[in-house]
Amino acid sequence: MTSPTLFRTACLAASVLLLAACGQPATSGHDASAAAAAAPLRQLARGDVLQARLAPVAASLPFTATLNALTSIEVAAEIDASVREVLVREGESVRRGQLLARLDGETLQQALVEQQAQLANDEARLRLARLKLDKQRELYQQGFISKLAFDEVDSEYRIREGDVNARRSQLARARKSLADTAVHSPMDGVVYARRIQPGEQVSRNQKLFAIADLSQLEATASIPARQVAQVQPGQRARFRVEGATEPFAAQLVRINPVANAGSRTFNAYLRVDNRAGRLQAGQFVTGEVILREISDAVRLPQAAVRDADGSKPWVMLLDGNTLRRQPVSIVLRNDSERVLAVRGIELGRTLLAAPLLGLKPGDRVALPR
């Protein structure tokens, strides 16, 4: 009686334990899924992501240079004289023909009057010699004087005529010297050097002013020999100067075909339009000559592209809240600006701007608000 009862009791207990054991895994799996769904997404900052947009990317050759005036001139004294008046200072704009200074011309004025008087005397003597010549020609033709006598009168006339021509030349020089007491600007530009003061004595060929035309500037860039074959006249360039936020445009106009002896580099000359007057001669610039430019590809920072130097570059694209790997192709690289032109991404898609520690394809993230 006792044994069958104990056996039924044991079987019942075993069945209960078995059912409990069978139900335990199902309960644990449900809890794990709920925990995964409830796990917080990794929050991204605004600087962690960017959108795929079209923007120009250029392959370029960097350079540094100094801006210089394309045209400049130094105005020198044409005569020996003292300075009576100086009318301009450094930094002032001047026009072609504008009066810059006056030199003392009193002595030259007296010399001019003297030359005028002497010319009048010589012209009177020439007129008299002409009358004599005409009279002697008539007598010679009538046979009243010899050929020798006529030749003497003709020679005297030729001498008087030479004296008048020489005096006229001296008078022209005297007028020129007197006119040179007024120093005029030979070009439009800006006075960047003034080397005289009123009362000073100047001598012929002494430098008085330096004037530069700043509407056109030129920068000389040194191009390494291994890269000189990539540049040619007509290529565009852009550069920046300290204190300016926007870049300036330039154009490569010529290349010196002879290398610099010390550095073995070649000088490339860049023309800059400065009619707006925003640049100054002597400014140091950093820029780049544009070798090739693409405007119909997505512009990305180099940090956004993984394996950029390999054969299979890719980016981390956001598909909803999930990260996934997106292959791309690199069509142009700008190492100076550290940007790439890529294809293989739809415009407007969001991707990581740079690798983030701990994130990998398949992870879920939250976009910045």
Image (cartoon, rainbow, N blue to C red):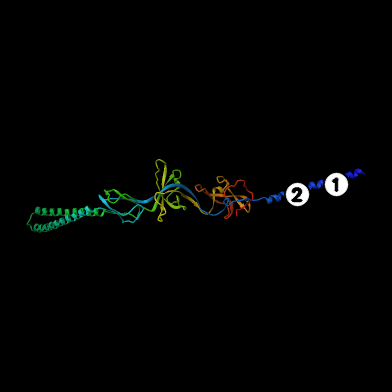
Residue farthest right in this picture: 1
Q: Position of residue 32 (x, y in %)?
A: 71, 49
Pointer 1 or 2: first along the chain = 1
Q: Residue 27, which numbered label?
A: 2
Q: Residues within 10 Å of mark 2 (few under 14, many from 20)?
A: few
Instruction: Say which element carries label 2.
Output: helix
Q: Is residue 55 left or right of residue 282?
A: right
The CA distance from mark 1 to mark 2 is 23 Å
The amino acid sitting under disc 2 is Thr
Give 50 or 243, whichever is nearer the viewer. 243
Do the CB atoms of the residues marked 1 and 2 lie less than 8 Å apart? no
> Measuring 76% from the left and 47% from the top, which residue is drawn there?
25
Give 253 or 219, whichever is nearer the viewer. 219
Q: Position of residue 199 (x, y in %)?
A: 27, 50
Q: Residue 368, which numbered label?
A: none
Q: Residues within 10 Å of mark 1 (few under 14, many from 20)?
A: few
Instruction: Say which element carries label 1.
Output: helix
Image quadrant holding the N terminus, namely top right
Q: Position of residue 31 (x, y in %)?
A: 72, 49
Q: Position of residue 18 (x, y in %)?
A: 81, 46
Image quadrant holding the C terminus, namely bottom right
Q: Is residue 79 visible?
A: no
Residue farthest top in this picture: 262
Residue denoted by label 1: 12
Give 310 or 32, whichever is nearer the viewer. 32
The amino acid sitting under disc 1 is Leu
Residue farthest left in this picture: 144
Q: Is residue 106 visible?
A: yes
Give 300 or 179, whichever is nearer the viewer. 179
Q: Is residue 179 left or right of residue 44?
A: left
Q: Is residue 96 left or right of residue 227?
A: left
> Measuring 85% from the left and 46% from the top, which residue is drawn there?
12
